Every structure is written in structure tokens, then in C-alpha cells.
Amino acid sequence: MVAFPHCATIEKDNLILLYLLGITTYRFCGLWVSISVREETMTATCDAVLKANTQYAANFGDKGKLAMPPARRFAILTCMDARLDPAKYAGLVEGDAHVIRNAGGRASDDAIRSLVISHKLLATNEWFVIHHTDCGMLTFTNEVMSDLLDDNLETAGFDGKKWSNPKHGGGNVCGHFINWHTISDLPKSVVEDVKRIRTHPLVPGYIPIYGFIYDCATGRINEVKEASAAGRPTA
């Protein structure tokens, strides 16, 4: 930023206009002032994503003609973990199914919102709740997450046993007012989420809801029978 004399205020848009016109220095209040505009550049990650998308679009074929409703009429609620690829472990291609993801694959209000839309407007009639082994949501509690954020907002470190902030200061208390939907027992969490969806007043009783755990070591999904039993149709 350029520090200007107190005799006037310079609007940011005017500075940018001067810069675009090729005017990088000018006299203001008796002083020569230089204009410096920071040019944003793409990160290597963003550049790689755009290149990959160019290749994908080049071979897009007839996918632009796919219908909005999923062809196989089912939805999956699962975790955002990067090791999970629902398209591969469930045999999906574009247009097959809805995949709803969040931290832990939890049946949060927003996840249920998506599932209700998925059925009501887009005709899915079977739902899967799929959690997974070695989930990060098993490594902390609501209190731990809230305290970390209260202390500092930058990425925390994990030593295999506990999380800690490498820096301190600049945090915010708002984390204490969020339910982070952490997990202490993996099968139990699947049962809880299936039951929460099953008993929700906006979920029709005729939709079957299945509960599974994806094994990160083998790639297999293993049924949580208690969860699937809780998700049986009631109408």
C-alpha cells in the first residue's frame, strides 16, 4: 500500500484505473507517488487442476446429455477423506448416483437436507451411509477442536496421540458453538446416523437406508448390520 498525504483520500478503483492506463507515477499534494498493484498468480495446484479439466473436457463426449436425476436412483452419504473414491468403491460413473460428503460422513442437518432433495426432487429411493476406518474424526472431540480454534486458526499438528497448535494467538471462540460431529465408536456412529435419517420427519418410511464401513486397508465396504436393520423401511 502507498501512504498518501492527509490532504485527500485516494480511492482504490482510481489507482487501478491509472495503473491500467500506464500511469505508474504521478504528482499528488506536491509529492511524486508511485502506484504498485499486486498481480495475483495461480498456484501450481490450481494450474494442475485446470490442466486436468482441459483434458477431461476434451473427452467429455455425450456426458453433456446426461439427465439431472441419477440413473441408478440411489445416494451415498460418506466422508470427505481423500482416500475414499465412491465412484470406484461403488462402481459409479457420471450420472449414476448422488454422493454427499462431509467430515466423517455424518448425518448432519445439511446432509439430511441434501438427501431429502435427492429423493423429493430427483427420485433416489435407496440411501447408503458409509463411514470408514482410520477416520480423522476419531482423533479429537468437540472440546479439542473448539479449544484449538480458540487458540489459533492455522493448521494444527498431530503427533499420533493428540493435536496441538504450532502457533498461538489470533483464534476465535466461535468453534465452541459448533457441533463438530466427532466419532468415538465407528460402528456406533453409523448406527446413530442411520437412525437419525430414518426417524427424520421429512424422510419417507419406504426408503431403505444401509450402513457400511469402508476399510481403508482393503478397499472393501463392510455392512454394519445393526445400522442396516435400523434403516429398514417402516412403510
Image (cartoon, rainbow, N blue to C red):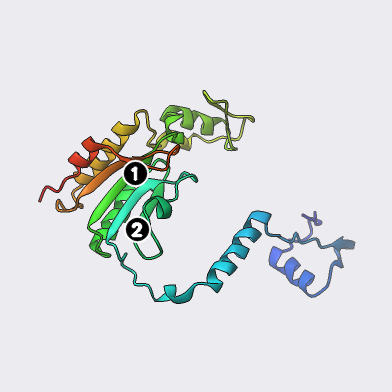
Residue at 18 percent across and 49 percent down: it is 201
In screen coordinates, is 60 left or right of 126? right
Q: In which quarter of the image is the N terminus?
A: bottom right
**In which quarter of the view is residue 169 placed?**
top right
Which kind of residue does numbered mark 2 sit on?
His
Q: In this orientation, which residue lies closer to the viewer: 33 or 235?
A: 235
SS for dot 2: strand
Number of disc labels? 2
Residue at 43 percent across and 72 percent down: it is 63
User: Residue 30: percent from the left, percent from the top?
Assistant: 89, 63
Residue 108 visible here = no
**In which quarter of the view is residue 66 placed?**
bottom left
Q: Distance between the residues labelled 2 and 1?
A: 13 Å
Which kind of residue does numbered mark 1 sit on?
Ile
User: Residue 226: percent from the left, percent from the top?
Assistant: 22, 35
Q: Residue 90, relative to residue 149: is it above or below?
A: below
Residue at 41 percent across and 55 percent down: it is 87
**Which residue is tagged 2?**
98
**Which residue is tagged 1?**
130
Mark 2 vs mark 1: which is more N-terminal?
Answer: 2
In the image, farthest residue toward the top: 161
Residue at 58 percent across and 68 percent down: it is 55
Q: In this orientation, which residue lies closer to the viewer: 136 or 151?
A: 136
User: Residue 181: percent from the left, percent from the top?
Assistant: 37, 36
